[in-house]
Image: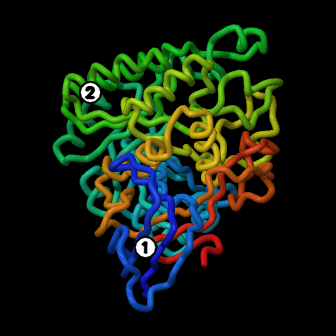
Amino acid sequence: MKSLHFTNARLIDPEALTDSLGSLTATAGQISAMNGPAPDGAQQINCAGKCLAPGIVDWGVKVGEPGERHRESFRSAGMAAAAGGVTTLIARPDTMPAIDTPELLEFVTRRAAEAAPVRILHMAALTKGRAGLEMTEIGFLRDVGAVAFSDADHVVQDTRVLARAFSYARSLGALVVGHPQDQGLSRGTSATSGKFASLRGLPAAPALAERIGLDRDLGLVELTGVRYHADQITTERALPALVRAKANGLDVTAGVSIHHLTLNEFDVGDYRTFFKLTPPLRSEADRLAVVAAVGEGLIDVICSMHTPQDEESKRLPFEDAAAGAVALETFLPAAMRLFHAGALSLPMLFRAMSLNPARRLGLPQGRLAAGAPADLVLFDPAVPYLLDRAALHSKSKNTPFDGQRMEGRVIATFVAGKQVFGGAQ
């Protein structure tokens, strides 16, 4: 493979938290030098002052294989990821059937490697069928490549079952991903309690349901010592529990979706179902608190929480419509809203979108440093455009940003030094 030498690049380094002009060389699929001379025969890529950053490590992507390939396949998800600057995709186990056996995990791993231009790794279910009754064969699943264990948005309601699963995962050093939510309060709801939900007549759950669910999970983390990641922390009331857990030395990290960082409950407007998410959109005060928590490093990871849904499941009354939105291609431009608003710098964003998820999952990606994989995204953070959902590479088109003015476009994406998207020369 020919070496690549990127010149005149605005290097976004999430480890050093720097944003500076320089050059980068990639050889044999790895970053071989920073700010060094071009090797003989290297392909020269003039970045023209545009941003070069580690490829996004997107943790928590729903792919429709197996069972819902009409919504998203590994091929379409991989193409959407490449177009969005996502070079490593961490797939959720909430498929049909759930990824809860080593055989099924091996199957989807092979399919992903054959079909997608980006790296795809998989989480496996924590309990069989994600039913919350009996834990999966965590050790065997880990042996065949599961990077973490989660029942996704199916919360295990039996605390004893969850405690046993945590204990077993702890004995194997496995990472468990929880969805903090009290099901008794949130079951059957589609909005966050407040004046807006009341005026719209929407069944709503209090924001406190998230903190109650998180408190239970953190109590079990303290009991068992398991490595734990909360997939989405979206409310201000949940943040103090996270502060205490980290201060007490628990092995805990947390994430949030890009939608909960850039949208609020008022965006639902007149029952627009593309804005129906799990958990539901929160108040503006919650959004601002969570953005600040990302900046402080309290919330470690930003993810897309990409959830493709077909037209039939979205074009229903708000209460009946399926929850979720596609986000692989809108992840980066949505994040640029936070940058242009002055809320988060580019290095801070890539710390949460690339470096931290890679570190938590034990992956070598997410860094601009010699020896790191040459998984890179070249992008212009300022170019404006109107988003047309019909142009998205995902099979499903359920984005809340359709028709909105966005800023930030991916110019080229590289995986292991190979260009998988764009026209960089």
Camera-side residue of 272 and 418: 418
Point 33% across, 35% down: residue: 253
Q: Quadrant of residue 352?
A: top left
Residue 132 in sight in this render: no
Mark 1–mark 2 Cα distance, whole angstroms, equals 34 Å
Whichever of labels 1 and 2 marks the residue nearer the N terminus, that label is 2
Callout 2 crowding tier (Cα within 10 Å): few <14, some 14–19, many ≥20: some
Residue type for callout 2? Lys
**Image position of 90 with respect to 242: above or below:** below
Point 59% across, 50% down: residue: 332
The residue identified by callout 2 is 246
Point 38% across, 23% down: residue: 214
Callout 1 crowding tier (Cα within 10 Å): few <14, some 14–19, many ≥20: many
Describe the element under mark 1 as helix, strand or loop: loop
Camera-side residue of 366 and 158: 366
Residue 122 x/y as whole percent:
42, 56
Quick check: 264 left or right of 51? right
The residue identified by callout 1 is 416
Residue type for callout 1? Ala
Residue 64 x/y as whole percent:
60, 56
Describe the element under mark 2 as helix, strand or loop: helix
Camera-side residue of 195 and 322: 195
Quick check: 181 left or right of 101? right
